[in-house]
Structure formats: C-alpha cells, structure tokens
Amino acid sequence: MTSDLLSVHGVSLRIVVRQFWEELRSNDVLGRSAQLAYYFFLALFPFLICIVASLSVLGRADRGRILLFELLARFLPPPAFQLISSTFDEILRAGGPLKMSLGVIVSLWSASMGMTAVVGTLNAAYKVKETRSLLKQYGVAIGLTIAITLLLVGSIVAVLVGHRFAAESIFGKTGLVIWKMAPWLIGCLVLLLTFDVIYYYGPNLNNRKWHWITPGTVAGIALLILVSIGLRVYLHYAGTYTLTYGSLGGVIILLLSFYLSGIALLSGGVLNAILEGLTSQATCPRYRGTLDKDQPSR
C-alpha cells in the first residue's frame, strides 16, 4: 500500500460508510464468512492439536494448554467452549504420535483453505485479479497459517516464561498480580499482528507498505469483541437453541461464533481497501468518479 490509510483527504464519513456497505454486498462478505466458518470448524481441533504438540516440544504442553483454554473461555460462549473442551479431552485420550502428525497436516490444509477464501475476498475488495500461480497461492495461505500458529505459540510461551520470572522476581506477589494482565495485553497484540499480517500479505498487490495499525485492523478487532460480547448476552437472555437443535446446540453456537468472527475479519479488510481507494484516486477511477458525484457543488 502506497498511501496513508489514516488520511482520506476530507472525504465525509457518510461516503465511507456508504461505500463500505456497498462493498460488503457486492463482495458477498456474508456468504464468504459462512464459507470461512466451515473451514474454521474443520481446522479447529487439528489446529489445537498442532498448538499442543508444538508446546510439548518446548516442554510447556500442560500449562500452555490451560492458558490457551482460559483465553478461549473468555472469547467463546459457554456452550461452544464446553464442546471444544470435552471434544479435545476425548481426542487427547485416544491420541498418539500418528494422530498428532495427521493433526498438523489436516490443520494446515483446512486453515489454508479458509485463508484462501480470505485472500479471495481481499482481492475482490481491492479490485485486483489473482495473478499468482496456484502453487504460490497455496504457499501464501500455508505461510499465513504457519505465521499465525507461531504467533500464538510464541505468545503462550512468553506468558508462561514471564509468569515464572515474575514469581521469582524481587516484587514477589506484587509482580504476579501485575503479570496477570499480561495474557490480555499479549492476546491483543497477537490479534493486532494477525490481522495486520493477513491484510498485508493476503491481497495480490504489487506495491505494499506495512502499517502497524490500520483503521481496518482496529475496526475488525473491535467488531470481533462486540460480536463476542453480543453473542454471550443473546445466549444468556434468549438461549433457546437447545430447544431447536437439541444436542447439536453447542455445534451451532460454535459455527455461529466462527461466522461472526469471519464477518469481522473480512469487514476490516474491506474497510482498508476502501480507504486505500479513497486516498489513491489516480489508480482507482471508480472511487474518483464516486467522490466527484458525491462531493457538494461550490
């Protein structure tokens, strides 16, 4: 990206919101989010196996798993988390080296398919065609998946190692109390980097410029937090899903969580694409024409 996404040269918020809504509809973000939810669901348990296997190599499997599931419990509705926790326990009891190896392979395949769907949406938002070879496309998708896995594993290890140093520091219990905030800060940082990496490497753009914080990243994370809270509130006051779906209620809630998360992720990318178009009108005639028509006459 060659332009500053934080500057839209006086374009009114109404224009940005209108174009954002039009892009959501024209790029079928809701439909693509449903596709993402399917791939996320397929990749979930293999991905968790991959994370635990990576932590086992570093000697942090048990404590790392506890921390990981604590974070999941904070973000996911209780029925979805209970489903994940019980199912993962069953997988571990029946697991072995072969299952762990297959988990890594399946996780990469499923997650890369979901990442391919994200890349397709970002290309559509930026109005660019996919000219990369099929091998390179899969390479980008798998590379993004591995990068996100390493970010998550690294953050868990950092929290565990930091907790140990905090306990042994001269601050004692005070250090531990302060360090309890670390998982949330590191979690926000991992989310920020995850969104930034996807938005940077996903679309097929020739000229890219790295931004640590973009409006799309902020909006995507904010929307992700809002839908998480909103889903929890809805289930608390109107949780009739068990009457409709019975024992499948937990699965439905989990899929719904993935669906809303997909909307948040793709919406942030669409917003960045719109702002890029508004600040690079010379290369985006469609946006220039829209602005000329919508700006008030003098």
Image (cartoon, rainbow, N blue to C red):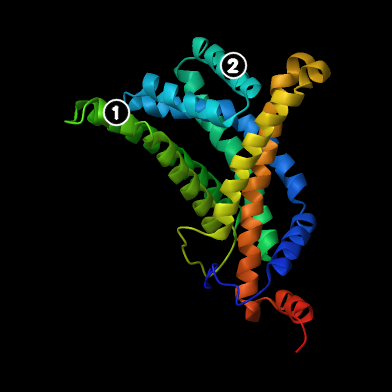
Residue 87 is labelled as 2
> Residue type at mark 2?
Thr
Q: Does residue 49 sit above or below 23 in this rendering?
A: above
Q: Does residue 281 sit above or below 221 in this rendering?
A: below
Q: Between residues 173 and 43, which one lies in front from this camera angle?
A: 173
Circle 1 Cα neighbour tier, 10 Å, few/some/many (<14 / 14–19 / ≥20): some
Locate residue 62, reporting x and y percent: 39, 19
Q: Quadrant of residue 5?
A: bottom right
Q: Residue at image x 74%, y 20%? A: 249
**Which residue is most to the bottom?**
298
* Front disc: 1 or 2: 1
* N-term-proximal mark, 1 vs 2: 2
Locate residue 169, reporting x and y percent: 19, 30
Q: CA distance from mark 1 to mark 2?
A: 32 Å
Q: Residue at image x 65%, y 50%? A: 266
> Residue type at mark 1?
Leu
Q: Residue at image x 51%, y 42%? A: 145
Quadrant for the C terminus, please. bottom right
Q: Does residue 292 sit above or below 190 in this rendering?
A: below
Q: Which residue is mark 1?
A: 176
Locate residue 152, reporting x and y percent: 44, 37
Horizontal arrangement in the rendering, residue 156 relative to residue 200 (left or right): left
Q: Which element type, helix, strand or loop, lies under badge 1?
A: helix
Horizontal arrangement in the rendering, residue 184 relative to residue 215 (left or right): left
